[in-house]
Image (cartoon, rainbow, N blue to C red):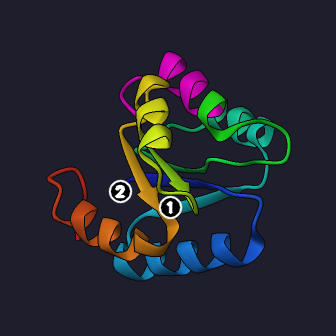
Amino acid sequence: MFRMLIVDDGAIFRQLLREVLSMKFPLAEVHEAVEAEEAFETIQTLVFDFIFIDIHLRDQNGLELAKRIKSAHPETTVIILTNYDAPEYREVASQFGADHFMPKDSFVEMINTLSKSRRIPI
C-alpha cells in the first residue's frame, strides 16, 4: 500500500485527479489538501509516496511547499501540476526540488507513466 496527497485549491480538478488515481491504483490511499499549510500539517503525521502540488495555491506558492516537503521528506516524490507549461516554470520547479513537472492537461499520461514505476503496485 502507498499514499498520495493532492494539494490543489481547485475542487473540480482535485476531485477528478482523486477519482483517476483511485481507479488506476485501487490499493492506494489518496488524501487531499486545499492549502499549503493544511498539506504540510498532514505530511507531519502521514508518510506519502507521491504528492501532487498545484503551482498556484491560495496561501502559498506551490513551489515553496515543494521545497519545504523535500527538505523534510527527501524520499517523497513531488510532482508540480500547472496550467502554465513554460520552460522557466520547469526550471524553477526543479530548483525547488520537484521531481516532476506536469501540465494539468496531461496528468493522465503522467499517471500511466507512474503506474509502470517499480514503486507502485497495480
Up the image or down, 67 lies above or below 117; here it is: above
* Foreground residue among 55 and 115: 55
Instruction: Give the residues drawn in magenta, as a range.
Output: 65-77
Residue 116, image quadrant: bottom left
Residue 20 visible (yes or no): yes
* Foreground residue among 89 and 61: 89
- Residue 1 is tagged as 2
Q: Position of residue 63 (x, y in %)?
A: 60, 34
Q: Residue furthest right?
A: 59
Query: Is residue 75 covered in magenta?
Result: yes
Name the main secondary structure of what is drawn in magenta: helix
Rendered-image quadrant of the N terminus: bottom left
Residue 12, image quadrant: bottom right
Disc 1 to disc 2: CB gap under 8 Å:
yes
* Foreground residue among 116 and 103: 103
Judging by the rendered image, the residue that carries numbered circle 1 is 29
Up the image or down, 93 lies above or below 30; here it is: above
Which residue is found at the position 56% from the left and 72% from the top?
18
Question: Disc 2 residue type?
Answer: Met
